[in-house]
Amino acid sequence: MSPKPQQETLVQPESLGDADAGNRVVITGMAGSFPDSYNVKQLEEILYNKVNPVGSREPRWEYNHPEIANHTGQAPDLKHFDAHFFKVHYLLANAMDPMSRKIVEHTYEAIYDAGICPEQLSGKKVGVYIGTCMSESEKACFYVATAKNNFGIAGCSKSMFANRISYWLNVKGPSMSVDQACCSSSVALQLAYEAIRRGDCEAAVIGGASLCLHPQQSIHTSRVIDLCPDGKTKSFDKNADGCALSESISVLFIQKAKDAKRIYAEVLHVKNEYTEIVKTETGPKYGFYRDVGDMTYFIKQFYKEANVDPADVKYVEAVGSATGEVDKVELEAFNNVYCTQRREEPLLVGSVTSNIGYTAAASGICSILKVLLAYRNGLLAGNLHCENVRDDIDALRDKRIQVVTDHKKFNGGYVAVNGISITGINAHVLLNRVYKPKDLSRYQTSIPRLVTISARQQTAVDSIFKDLKSRPVDPEELALFYNIHENHISGHLGRGFAILDTNEDQETVCLVQKSDYFDDAKKPLWFVYSGMGSQWVGMGAHLMRIPIFAAAIERTQCG
């Protein structure tokens, strides 16, 4: 099971430490679907239970080809979409790229996770930046004979991945889709971060998505990078033989700290830059290959711009492509940047690619999510499939760098996320944990707590209450619910309330719970003109259906 969170993420801006703290950019919401995982909570369980989700489902195709990767990570539930809730015509919903449908859904979840009602954002300057690269659906809408409606461009155009979110939320900030191959979501984060710092928007949605729905994508990918035959990505292992092709649709919500209801981490700096495609005697060498000198220079320049000493970085979430030459270059660059001075503790290195596979355009956000979970739980999730850590690098032999193969306690601090694209882009992100210890004693009260919830369905309301009853009452978590459900949310047809208390054993006790279907339609107003009198035949009989009226009549008869 996943670990119990060790820190609280609800903080005030002043806990960030200086006068300008309120204007710092922070991550406040996260959501997504991943291989064999419907949400971040299930991703957390996969990471901390050390489960390999790649190849756990039946393949999407039966295709006999020597270059095909038979083991792929599959994001679940791509066929279902609540078109009405997201203001999408049903014909358009059927023509939409599955990535576009899931990005809209996870945007709602990320905003909700931030403790914000989506309708509170209407009319505000909120940016939307979505990173994607390959899309089979975009091609199919033009060339598949069964595509008979007129929604192909609106459904599959990449620009609509972002623009549809802006339309649904009615936000007025920048809205764009980004394609920078494997670094697409990292570039989207940089654009959003810089826009907030400039004042172009006050908050932003950042998304990354990658799906593999057709065997041809697997074949073409295998001709550029090494794909492992067994679905096990052995990052930094002596027996590394390539990565597993995988899928993810993931979303972050970022804001200025002064506007945040909760904070997972502060974004200190983001940079993406084209460095090179390695040249050989026979021509360009495509893939993740880099010159160690060029990567070292890029990362050093990053820390000069961030005004942070690289020696203060405690953990690096690496690409870990499980290609021997690439892994070696990445680790040697880390040694040249982070380990030039004597460190009190070794630099910790891990890779989410080993845990869930290579997620292409979504890989940047997937790496960040792994870091956010480590911040929240106080525990770094270990790499999978790294049984024989390579020993051909001095920094590994003398323990200046340590690959995290087992879960490791983590007290926070600076964390770097490294990225590499097959098209020559290098990416780097610097995060810092915002720490505030939880002190529930400040919220002690003898009065039970009322929780009011609305959701798309009554069953969803009951599910939320079930989760709240399974854990100790957390007043700060309830404060997020109060803020979200303070106002009406269009399309929420389930409503309910519960009164929660705590017994002597500090267990949550539910005193009252009720939920029901709520008809969100406006009721018609009727006027009755009864002429000279205010009565009509049978009026009394009809009123007898009202219990209080019937009881009053019965009392008069008894008298």
Image (cartoon, grey):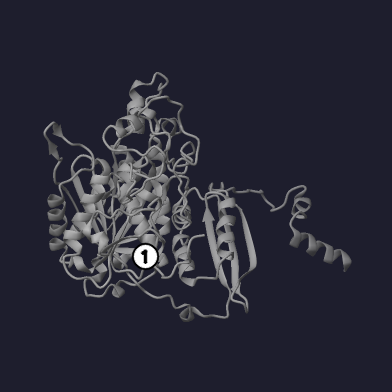
Crowding near pointer 1: few (<14 within 10 Å), some, many (20+)? many
Residue 471 location, quadrant: bottom right
Q: Is residue 559 left or right of residue 269?
A: right
Q: Is residue 551 left or right of residue 239?
A: right
**Farthest top residue in view:** 145
* Image coords of residue 119 (percent x, y): 40, 54
Residue 224 location, quadrant: top left
Look at label 1 and name its amino acid: Tyr
Q: Work out whether residue 518 or residue 257 is closer to the camera in this orientation and state it.
A: 257
Q: Is residue 83 above or below residue 551?
A: above
Residue at image position (33%, 50%) is 237
* Image coords of residue 166 (percent x, y): 32, 46
* Image coords of residue 112 (percent x, y): 43, 56
Residue 183 visible within the image = no
Q: Work out whether residue 542 or residue 28 is closer to the camera in this orientation and state it.
A: 28
Q: Quadrant of the C terminus?
A: bottom right
